[in-house]
Amino acid sequence: MAKRKRLTPAVITDAPALETKAMPRYPLGVAPKTRAPIADVAQDASASAALTEIAQTLTDARAEGRLIQKIALDRISDDYLVRDRIAVDDAEMATLVGSLRERGQQTAIEVTALDGGRYGLISGWRRLQALRQLESADVLAIIRTPQDSADAYLAMVEENEIRVGLSYYERARIVARAVDQGIYRTDRVGLVTLFHAASRPKRSKIGSFITIVRALDDHLQFPTALTERVGLSLAQALDADAGKADQIITALRAHVPETAEAETAILMDALADKPAPAAAKQPAQSMAEPPRDLGQGLRYKRTAKGDIVLSGAQLDDADFRQKLQAFLTKNAT
């Protein structure tokens, strides 16, 4: 009898249990793609290039004077240049101090790097003085690299011309001082260079006031109060008469004016060849002397009562004040 064929699979009871296949950890069983090493290299190279570009941009901005930096206030030297501004209106300074106190410094000053980690002030003298009144520790500044002293003086003048106009006398005086220091060969060269952007009539008026600076700078106590009309008349008289300067100086010495109005009256009388006012109209005890620069950031002035007043950034130095006090004490005994 033939054997029947098995139609169902044989059951093997002694075989080891089959391992169950683990379910995939990713949706639909698709694993994420792995990054090729070249992608990491490209990303690192891109990041490095970006950092290099930023560093170069900052370097260029610093070199070109486009980067505002925070500098310690005591590292700024006020006397790097002879300042063009002679006097500061107290009301204007009070307004500036109030603005800085409430809103902080909104506009950077301009300085240039000096030896020993110090910086010389080019422009922003009023802001610097206001911050010192507020006892601020730092100042926001742009570090310039002028080619020479002439370039630095030009930067100072242009900044003041844009922001706060100077008197004609102050404009003329900075030209004269720059020439005296050898920055420019002549008054004419200094005038045309420093005020190249001014109109021809304006430069002509400044040139007239240079005549007054040369003749009377050490003898006028209120030079910034000279109006355009009085100044031009005075300059014309000084040019026409070589002895007019001596006549005016004699009148100013004999009757030291205590106000700008009194000084203007003396000048006008001298221009009209009128005799000087009677001595009784001026205090006999008046001992005033015109203010003058002593150098090293110091300015000297003697009042009508005989008091001597020293001012300037040099007095911020405690060591200097101590030496000055010791000197005065020694020589007073």
Image (tube, rainbow, N blue to C red):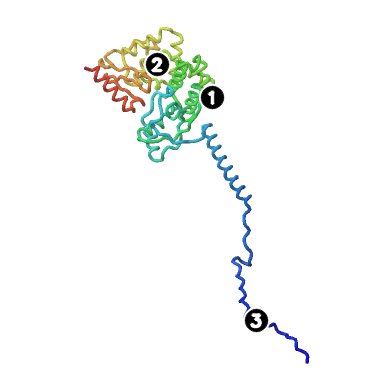
Secondary element at tag 3: loop
Q: For this rendering, which residue is in front, 20 or 192?
A: 20
In the image, is residue 156 above or below residue 241? below
The residue beneath circle 1 is 197
**N-term-proximal mark, 1 vs 2:** 1
* Residue 296 in view of the camera: yes
- Extreme left residue here? 333
The Cα–Cα distance between marks 1 and 2, rounded to whole angstroms, is 26 Å
Local crowd at mark 3 within 10 Å, few (<14), some, or many (≥20)?
Answer: few
Q: Is residue 232 visible?
A: no
Q: Amino acid at mark 2?
A: Asp
Separation of disc 3 and disc 2 at Cα?
A: 125 Å
Q: Residue furthest right?
A: 2
Q: Residue furthest front?
A: 1
Whichever of callouts 3 and 2 sits on the residue coming sooner in the sequence is: 3
* Residue 225 location, quadrant: top left
Amino acid found under the numbered disc labelled 3 = Ile
- Disc 3 marks which residue? 12
Q: Residue at x 38, y 33 (%)?
A: 130
Secondary-structure class at tag 1: loop
Dots 3, 2 in contact, CB < 8 A: no
Residue at the spot x=42%, y=27% of the render? 116
Which of the two residues, 46 or 200, is positioned nearer the viewer here?
46
Q: Quadrant of residue 320?
A: top left
Mark 1 crowd level (few <14, some 14–19, many ≥20, 10 Å Cα): few
